[in-house]
Amino acid sequence: MSAGNQEPVGGADVDRFNSDLTVSEPLNETSRQYTTELLSVENVSLSFGGVQAVTDISFNIMQGEVRAIIGPNGAGKTSLLNVINGFYHPQEGVINFRGKPRRRMKPYQAAASGIARTFQNVALFKGMSTLDNIMSGRSLKMHRGFFWQLVHLGPARNEEIRHRRRVEEIIDFLEIAHIRKQPVGRLPYGLQKRVELGRAMAMEPELLLLDEPMAGMNLEEKEDMSRFIIDLNSEFGTTIALIEHDMGVVMDLADRVVVLDYGKKIADGTPAEVQASQEVIDAYLGVAH
Amino acid sequence: MFYREAGQFKTSYAADQALLPIRQDRIGLGLILFVAFVAIPLLASDFLIGSIMIPFLVFALASVGLNILTGYAGQLSLGTGAFMGVGAYSCYKLTTYFPDINILFMVLLSGVFSAAVGVVFGLPSLRIKGLYLAITTLAAQFFLEWCFIRIGWLYNYNDSGAIEVPQRKLFDIAITGASASPTVRYLVIVVLVSIMTLLAANILRGRIGRSWMMIRDMDIAAELMGVRPLYAKLSAFAFSSYYCGVAGALMVFFWIGSAEAEAFDINHSLLVLFMVIIGGMGSLLGCFLGAAFIWVLPIIIRAVPPMLGLDVIAATTEHVSNIIIGVLIIFFLIVEPHGLARLWQIGKEKLRTWPFPYSSN
């Protein structure tokens, strides 16, 4: 299997997937041009004791694009996301967000600067309702002080209602109105993933990091989730960084793909370029010795 | 059948976000408040008011305090008794220093001292969680208890080593001290507890309350939504300790009248913790149910043999009531680990669909 005779790169598959999704216009990477750099990762290395999780990785995310990060298990994808939103501090390298370099940043500072995130294994607030979970995404946008909240009148109440209205828009967008008041712990997995996306959306982030948003879903749920991600990107203009194992989804949604293997970057480019790369094929399929 | 929100449509978010969106709940609460504010002061005996209702309300308020910390913010604490003690001792110091200032103001102010102490002993929560945190709050319990015994300044160097409540008046009516009638003391407490419970409910449904629950349920995700763990945890400790402090001041000034350090020992902390667990973590209603279960039920059980005309010695009824309460605690925790409030919740959900249990989701 060589890159040469892979000429119509996933073409047929991609088209079929699109028609299933009933997306009116396939995302065509050549038709979308991005000029502003939102985030760049420069020569980042991260290790835990003797374990090298990420080695000298550089890539950038342009404003408005869908950027996929793929790679086999243990490649360092999630570690990279954790570096971007401040859970881990890389030993080496710089991260520039909106043109400003930052080295040590706490997760809440990353949140305040406009980076939201969903988790690989759902990290919802289990004891709270769907509504409260999504409302919690508005925390940073609510400013009424302690004493107003104590009486819950006037400004505090109006603020709550104003944000509730915004949250209801998200609930409509994600089609989860029927589970609004249910505790999320009782929801099925697919819906929990959707609520988690809603919670991240409520932050109105500039950059949304999605860690395997489709893991463990059936085809229908994947199609729904893909549709939400596409709409989110095209309607709200949210920049998205996506980790995903389903190659059909990745090749279809992403404008550009970065491929990691054993903590190193082995390919970076459009889905077509990445699929044609011999190194990527070797990483996924193994090499004959 | 009777408890159903059918036909009660909400046309605004304000109505949907009300504390009690269902009409039957509002009627129920209205009845309870009527009984508490009108029927009991007019009709109840001094024993019912002084030995059942006043302690019940004091413990309910302390449970609200602990429940905010443990049930809503997820920080286990064994120092409730000590925080109540801080409230009681600071109220005593304040009112003996400034006898002319209204005692109610002093009671509310004393909670501030308790909140400050709570923040200090809440600092370990930034590093440790769960049972380990509970052990560090034990340090607060023992250290503060030691202070109450050893630092004579706290009890004005009384020979008895106890704080004794002086008489204080409101509108020329004695509300504390030996001459204050139980009914007056009860009215003061029931007003304070009602208002403070309402304020707690308000905080819990707003941004701050949500940030506590976020920290409780998933601290990593909470941090990612912009919640600063330092602020969230310490504000929970402060708010909770304020409630415990006020409860402690009320306990000494409006219930027992004088107190030594032993009144705030570890048993007291555990008693309040049991109330929270039995009543239901993360439920304000649970605080009241738990306080009623732990405090009122033993009194009722002890009153049964004399009513039946049985001649049983006091020690026996005491032991028997302990056994019964213990068995009931085990029973309720097996039936519903989330407490009495959750049982009530399930009951309401069942009532909604009765008699057609399969008709809704």
Image (tube, grey):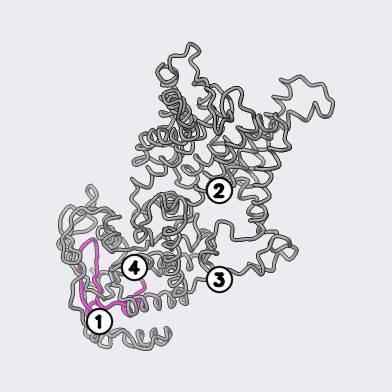
Helix, strand or loop status at disc 3: loop
Residue B294 in the image: above or below residue A180: above
User: CA separation, marks 1 and 3?
Assistant: 51 Å
Q: Circle 1 sits on which residue?
A: A272
- In this view of the protein, can residue A285 be seen by the observer? no
Distance from the alpha carbon under mark 4 to that under mark 1:
31 Å
Which badge, 2 or 3, comes first in the chain's sequence?
Answer: 3
The percent coordinates of residue B345 (x first, y second) are 63, 54
Proximity of marks 2 and 1: CB atoms separated by less than 8 Å: no
- Judging by the rendered image, the residue that carries numbered circle 4 is A204
Left or right: A105, with B273 as reference point: left
In the image shown, does B116 or A48 lie closer to the viewer?
A: B116
- Graded by Cα atoms within 10 Å as few (under 14), some (14 to 19) or many (20 or more), the crowding at tag 3 reads few
- Do circles 1 and 3 both sit on a common chain? no
**Residue B283 tag number:** 2
Q: Over which residues does the magenta segment extend?
A: A246-274
Callout 4: 10 Å neighbours few (<14), some, many (20+)? some
Callouts 1 and 3 close, C-beta under 8 Å: no
Give how far across and how far down residue B160 sits, in percent. Answer: 50, 13
Q: Chain of mark 1?
A: A
What subunit carries mark 3?
B
Q: Give the distance between the C-alpha atoms of the residues marked 4 and 3, in whole angstroms.
A: 27 Å
**For the residue marked with disc 2, what is the amino acid?**
Ser
Amino acid type indicated by mark 1? Ala
Number of the label disc, if any, that sits on residue B11: 3
